[in-house]
Image (spheres, helix red, strand yellow):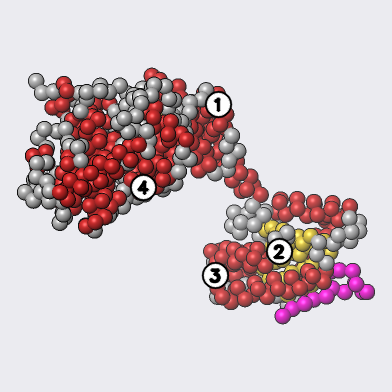
């Protein structure tokens, strides 16, 4: 019977020990020293340089396909910068793990750090590779040995290093160099490498000479330890000092007095909260007028209160089984680079079931060959929380713990996931309803053809301005505008061109008037303009600009568009009807004088209308 490894161990043996610094006798010292530091980028880089397992997890998180990729070899600092300080701290924040003192893990750890430091120095001397990239290659050069140790003995046949690398989707430039460094052992045992693979081989040999050989018996570099000259031994002495200094920086020197394992784990920026607290936090954005504001608050609440490492918001298209990612929360400033993913058949079925039953679904990677949505996010498992399942295009909140490797338990996470889903769905639906109400109100007050206020809104504005004038001495001017020969234009050129003429006239009026002025479509081809705080003299200048601009726009469009305007001002005792009557009277005077002009019915020394034309 062929053994099939279980999900928890086969895909990610790092679950057994997410961080070397989590060893029960190591963690208190690291937390004690790091807690006294400022927690800067330099501090994070320094501590992660001693933790190959945490760096492996960080590389996977930093180079997930969903984010923009870099073709160059990564470094620990570049990884920290991509992840941000919040996620970088999470890489070595985990419960203490018991490791037997006689375990091969400790010599393997020191050998990896020694190889990394040696590779850095050799690269700096030879110039064959960036020293920081060489450090990372040296730190991870014993990846097969690490994975073999982390996998329980009874499950060892089910673990393949290549499977893990493929499943983790590590940077291809890194994978290629790791394979080169572990190629056939060169017969030249010198410490002057000629290529990148030679840098790693020389670094491993130098680590062995420094008293920190690989504990793997079949390591070919072990057989070369007997071949060393004086220069080699001097380099090994210097390396030994460098390694001890690196460990001593965090109180990990060999002769240090043991500390009780009582140090509290460092905070990782996430905390659990009551469901009431979660709901209140999300509801704080209930009045947001933006869809993105609600989604951002929802994802942030999941990370903060649900102890999730990442939260993605995606729109689901059932007909094509495609998930389009719209937003994310993970504590970093990275932007989503690849938005659209095709779900696998298994993922699609789980998502459809989650929508139908309105409950969260647990998506887990298959035994081998990570594809689909999980591959895009580079995670072994995630919770998919349905949102607005009755919408034509529903959505999902995708939550994972891929950085901390904390297992997801639906029975434990169900209440939090349901709270996030129901609250988010209600807020999104409420936003949609508010948007529909606002659009309905807008359509009730605007003209659909010209997008100006309709007659009802124009009359309401005029009524308010007349009431204001009755309480003060501030001026008010009203213009009545009418397209000339509009019926003839419709009859000869067609109603389509007539509509174009109305739209063009409305556009000119809208852009010519001031921000505080009001304009509405009063009738078929008539427009009412209300000019608060405007005297007759100022209004005549504006009226002249209006009819000349409309005429010019008509010539640009090749349409016979002109307007006639009637102007009047508020007088004490005026009503809306009397104002409009005088404006109409002035308008017909403009028509009588030949059109494409304005006439003013204002208080002067005589009662004559004053026409103005081009």
Sequence-first tag of 2 and 4 = 4
Quadrant the N terminus occupies:
top left
**Which residue does the numbered mark 2 point to in the structure image?**
514
Where does label 4 land, which residue? 77
Residue 218 image offset from top left, x and y in percent: 9, 35
Q: Is residue 479 above or below residue 234?
A: below
Q: Earlier in the sequence, mark 3 or mark 4?
A: 4
* Marked residue nearer the N-terminal end (3 or 1): 1
- Between label 3 and label 2, give the one nearer the viewer: 2
Residue 277: mark: 1
Q: Residue at x 17, y 40 (%)?
A: 208
Q: Is residue 596 visible?
A: yes
* Magenta-highlighted residues: 601-614
For disc 3, the marked residue is 493
Q: Residue at x 26, y 51 (%)?
A: 121
| Image depth: mark 1 or mark 4 in front | 4
Closest to the observer, 215 or 402: 215
Residue 605 within the segment the image draws in magenta: yes
- Rounded to the nearest angstrom, the CA distance separating label 3 from label 4 is 70 Å
Mark 1 near mark 2, Cβ–Cβ under 8 Å? no
Given residues 482 and 416, the one toward you in this image is: 416
* Residue 558 left/right relative to 356: right
């Amino acid at each position: 019977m062929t053994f099939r490894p279980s999900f928890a161990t086969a895909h990610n043996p790092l679950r057994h020990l997410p961080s070397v610094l989590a060893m029960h006798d190591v963690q208190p010292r690291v937390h004690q020293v790091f807690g006294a530091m400022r927690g800067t980028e330099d501090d994070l880089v320094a501590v992660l340089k001693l933790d190959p397992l945490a760096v492996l997890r960080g590389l996977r998180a930093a180079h997930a396909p969903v984010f923009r990729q870099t073709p160059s070899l990564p470094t620990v600092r570049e990884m920290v910068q991509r992840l941000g300080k919040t996620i970088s701290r999470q890489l070595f924040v985990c419960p203490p793990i018991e490791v037997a003192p006689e375990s091969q893990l400790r010599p393997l750890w020191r050998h990896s750090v020694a190889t990394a430091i040696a590779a850095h120095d050799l690269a700096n001397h030879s110039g064959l590779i960036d020293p920081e990239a060489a450090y990372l290659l040296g730190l991870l050069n014993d990846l097969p040995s690490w994975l073999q140790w982390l996998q329980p003995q009874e499950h060892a046949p089910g673990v393949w290093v290549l499977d893990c690398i493929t499943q983790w989707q590590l940077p291809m430039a890194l994978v290629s160099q790791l394979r080169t460094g572990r190629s056939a052992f060169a017969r030249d045992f010198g410490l002057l490498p000629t290529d990148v693979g030679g840098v790693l081989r020389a670094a491993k040999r130098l680590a062995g000479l420094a008293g920190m050989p690989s504990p793997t018996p079949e390591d070919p570099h072990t057989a070369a330890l007997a071949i060393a000259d004086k220069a080699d031994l001097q380099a090994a002495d210097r390396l030994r000092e460098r390694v001890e200094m690196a460990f001593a920086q965090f109180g990990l020197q060999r002769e240090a007095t043991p500390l009780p394992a009582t140090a509290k784990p460092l905070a990782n920026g996430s905390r659990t909260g009551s469901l009431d607290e979660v709901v209140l936090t999300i509801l704080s954005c209930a009045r947001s007028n933006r869809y993105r504001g609600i989604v951002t608050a929802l994802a942030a609440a999941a990370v903060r209160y649900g102890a999730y490492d990442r939260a993605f918001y995606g729109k689901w298209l059932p007909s094509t089984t495609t998930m389009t990612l719209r937003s994310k929360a993970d504590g970093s400033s990275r932007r989503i680079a690849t938005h659209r993913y095709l779900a696998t058949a298994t993922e699609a079925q789980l998502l459809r079931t989650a929508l139908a039953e309105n409950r969260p679904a647990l998506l887990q990677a298959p035994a081998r060959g990570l594809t689909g949505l999980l591959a895009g996010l580079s995670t072994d498992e995630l919770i998919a929380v349905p949102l607005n399942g009755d919408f034509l295009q529903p959505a999902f909140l995708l939550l994972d713990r891929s950085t901390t490797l904390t297992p997801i338990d639906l029975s434990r996470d169900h209440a939090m996931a349901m709270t996030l889903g129901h609250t988010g769905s209600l807020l999104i639906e409420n936003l949609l309803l508010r948007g529909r109400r606002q659009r309905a109100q807008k359509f009730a007050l605007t003209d659909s053809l010209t997008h100006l206020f309709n007659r009802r809104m124009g009359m309401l504005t005029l009524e308010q301005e007349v009431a204001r004038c009755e309480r003060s001495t501030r001026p008010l001017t009203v213009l009545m505008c009418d397209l000339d020969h509009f019926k003839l234009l419709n009859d000869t050129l067609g109603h389509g061109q007539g509509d174009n003429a109305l739209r063009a006239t409305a556009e000119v009026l809208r852009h010519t008037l001031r921000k505080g002025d009001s304009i509405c479509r009063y009738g078929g081809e008539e427009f009412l303009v209300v000019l608060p705080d405007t005297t007759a003299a100022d209004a005549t200048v504006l009226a002249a600009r209006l009819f000349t601009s409309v005429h010019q726009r008509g010539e640009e469009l090749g349409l016979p568009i002109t307007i006639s305007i009637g102007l009047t001002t508020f007088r004490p005792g005026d009503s809306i009807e009397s104002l409009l009557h005088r404006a109409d009277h002035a308008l017909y005077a403009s028509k009588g004088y030949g059109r494409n002009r304005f006439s003013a019915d204002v208080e002067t020394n005589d009662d004559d209308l004053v026409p103005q034309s081009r």
